[in-house]
Image: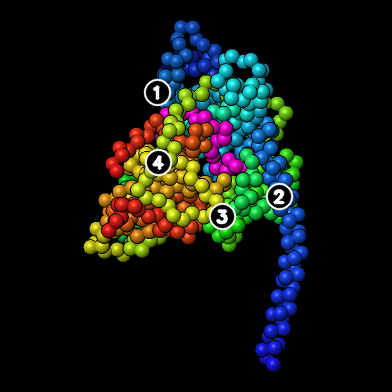
């Protein structure tokens, strides 16, 4: 550790740029070197004490405590989730847990990132609800449609359910297409000329 | 003896109800007059005031927030830059309007006088020649509401507090069971709308619009000033000749007062399905009827609702018939079953 490096940190803390060495260089050095970063921290603390800017209760190493707390957490959260899954939930939920499992085994920093991504996906799903028809239109339950997937479902009914779901999706699409076309036609009907014909709509050939 | 004792209260109740009916009838007439005045004031306020307002459409357990700006600009008689706009408005007062959906992809409606532009994710921006925007609030409220009198009663109900203001509740009650009622809470100061509910005959609220902010200003807002100098998308040419397309089918039953607005053949934007289409309107409510060939042979009636809007369809002999509109299920069913075919269904 050269004396000059401590000096450059000192000048950085004082917001003073050493002429012979760019401050970027000094920062890079400091980030690479644990000892230098500790010096940076100490210099700031000294500066704070001199300027009488220290808080009432001084926590000298907050970041270390946070890191410690973070390191503790995954060992509490993740295994519980796995246990629950293997015991009770079948089918769909198990799949989700399988997805979550590896995430749980990573450090909390990584799982926090995973949560955020899940959250974002959740959000986009939410906003989609406004646009996607299938969510907007609330269908009345119809005869012949399967109930939502239950915990103890059987393999052989799966294809039936699949078909029912597909049928339901097709139905939702139909409804949504009708709904949005209706709204579009109402807009166009407000036009002054009584017969609106959207340029985007190719008119049908007359097949009478 | 038992019968008599039963009959007497019934008779009494009957008499009482007649008496109260007479009373309520006379007050009803007064209420109706008052209600009509309020609605006329609403119409005037919607056209003449500069307002900046936000509202939320609540339906299907979801809330859609909107921002709505309206203003009137005085235009000098000889303004060349906007010749197209000002000729239609006699170069005097031009209404400016912006209605923007705040959640999800952009859906903006802009209006300058007799030009309305729609900016939507599904289409390239386009304009149509119209003096009304078609958004969540029925356009009729800014027009001549007397056209509704044939099919609806206007009833002034009472006062309450909405959006921190004193509000007058006006009910637009359908004369028959084939459509929904509209409840309007109107600001006593400005006459503007504060809340709107679409309500079934049994009093069930299907969807509502709650205003969350209302600001009335003397001067035009900056956004609207900018709108006025903005170049709007090109007006779509709507050919006027195919005024009434002849189909091989017709709708034989509609609730009283619904008139045909237009009929055409077009392809639906999302499904590309070619359809024959008729649109009906009673002043407040639009009903669309679609007829198209289907791959299915038969399909029982299916329906879904989006707030008050019902979508219903069925397939009979490979022909799909659909009805969309803010009408009760029974009305939609009756409309669908009233569609008859001249040749196709000759059997």
Structural crowding at the residue carrying mark 1, measured as other residues with C-alpha within 10 Å and reported as few (<14), some (14–19) or many (≥20):
few
Q: Was residue B131 drawn as part of the magenta stretch in this picture? A: yes
Q: Was residue B120 drawn as part of the magenta stretch in this picture? A: no
Circle 4/circle 3 CB separation < 8 Å: no
Q: Is label 2 in a helix, a strand or a loop?
A: helix
Which residue was labeled with disc 4? B245
- Calculate the distance from the C-alpha at mark 2 to the C-alpha at mark 4: 39 Å
Image coordinates of residue A73 in percent, x first then y, are 43, 46
Q: Is label 1 in a helix, a strand or a loop?
A: helix
Measuring 37% from the left and 45% from the top, which residue is drawn there?
B247
Q: Is residue B236 left or right of residue A157?
A: right
Q: Are marks 4 and 3 on the same chain?
A: yes
Quarter of the image for the N terminus of chain B: give it: bottom right
Q: Most prominent secondary structure in the magenta stretch?
A: loop
Quarter of the image for the C terminus of chain B: give it: bottom left
Measuring 42% from the left and 29% from the top, which residue is drawn there?
B124
A178 lies above or below B222: below
Which residue was labeled with disc 2? B35
Q: Is label 4 in a helix, a strand or a loop?
A: loop
Which residue was labeled with disc 1? A32
Which residue was labeled with disc 3? B180
């Amino acid at each position: 550790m050269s004396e000059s490096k401590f000096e450059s940190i000192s000048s950085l803390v004082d917001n003073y740029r050493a002429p012979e060495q760019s401050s970027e260089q000094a920062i890079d050095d400091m980030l690479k070197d644990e000892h230098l970063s500790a010096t940076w921290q100490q210099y700031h603390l000294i500066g704070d004490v001199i300027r009488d800017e220290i808080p009432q209760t001084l926590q000298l190493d907050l970041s270390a405590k946070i890191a410690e707390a973070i390191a503790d957490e995954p060992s509490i959260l993740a295994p519980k989730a796995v246990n629950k899954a293997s015991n009770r939930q079948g089918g769909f939920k198990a799949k989700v847990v399988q997805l979550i499992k590896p995430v749980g085994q990573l450090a909390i920093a990584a799982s926090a990132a995973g949560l955020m991504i899940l959250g974002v996906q959740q959000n986009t799903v939410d906003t989609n609800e406004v646009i996607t028809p299938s969510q907007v239109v609330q269908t009345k339950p119809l005869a012949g449609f399967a109930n939502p997937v239950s915990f103890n479902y059987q393999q052989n009914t799966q294809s039936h359910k699949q078909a029912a779901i597909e049928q339901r999706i097709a139905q939702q699409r139909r409804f949504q297409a009708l709904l949005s076309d209706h709204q579009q036609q109402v807009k166009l009907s407000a036009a002054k000329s009584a017969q609106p014909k959207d340029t985007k709509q190719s008119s049908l050939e007359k097949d009478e | 003896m038992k019968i008599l004792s039963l009959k007497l209260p019934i008779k009494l109740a009957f008499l009482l109800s007649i008496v109260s009916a007479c009373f309520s009838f006379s007050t009803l007439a007064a209420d109706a007059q008052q209600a009509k005045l309020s609605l006329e004031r609403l119409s005037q306020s919607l056209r003449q005031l500069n307002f900046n307002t936000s509202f939320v459409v609540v339906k299907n357990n979801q809330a859609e927030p909107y921002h709505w700006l309206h203003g009137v600009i005085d235009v000098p008689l000889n303004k060349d830059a906007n010749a197209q706009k000002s000729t239609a408005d006699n170069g005097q007062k031009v209404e400016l309007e912006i209605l923007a959906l705040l959640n999800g992809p952009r859906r903006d409606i802009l209006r300058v006088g007799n030009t309305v532009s729609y900016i939507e994710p599904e289409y390239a921006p386009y304009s149509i020649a119209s003096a009304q925007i078609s958004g969540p609030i029925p356009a009729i409220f800014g027009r001549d509401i007397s056209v509704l009198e044939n099919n609806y009663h206007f009833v002034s109900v009472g006062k309450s507090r909405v959006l921190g203001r004193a509000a007058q509740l006006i009910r637009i009650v359908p004369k028959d069971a084939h459509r929904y009622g509209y409840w309007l809470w109107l600001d006593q100061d400005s006459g503007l709308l504060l809340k709107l509910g679409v309500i079934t005959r049994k009093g069930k609220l299907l969807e509502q619009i709650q205003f969350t902010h209302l600001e009335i200003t003397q001067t035009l807002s900056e956004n609207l000033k900018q709108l006025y100098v903005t170049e709007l998308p090109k007006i779509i040419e709507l050919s006027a000749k195919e005024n009434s397309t002849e189909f091989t089918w017709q709708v034989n039953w509609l609730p009283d007062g619904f008139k045909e607005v237009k009929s055409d053949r077009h392809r639906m934007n999302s499904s590309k399905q070619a359809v024959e289409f008729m649109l009906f309107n009673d002043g407040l409510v639009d009903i669309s009827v679609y007829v198209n060939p289907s791959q299915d042979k038969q399909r029982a009636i299916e329906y879904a609702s989006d707030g008050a809007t019902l979508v219903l369809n069925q397939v009979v002999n490979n022909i799909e018939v659909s009805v969309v509109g803010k009408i009760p299920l029974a009305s939609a069913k009756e409309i669908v079953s009233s569609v008859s075919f001249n040749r196709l269904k000759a059997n």
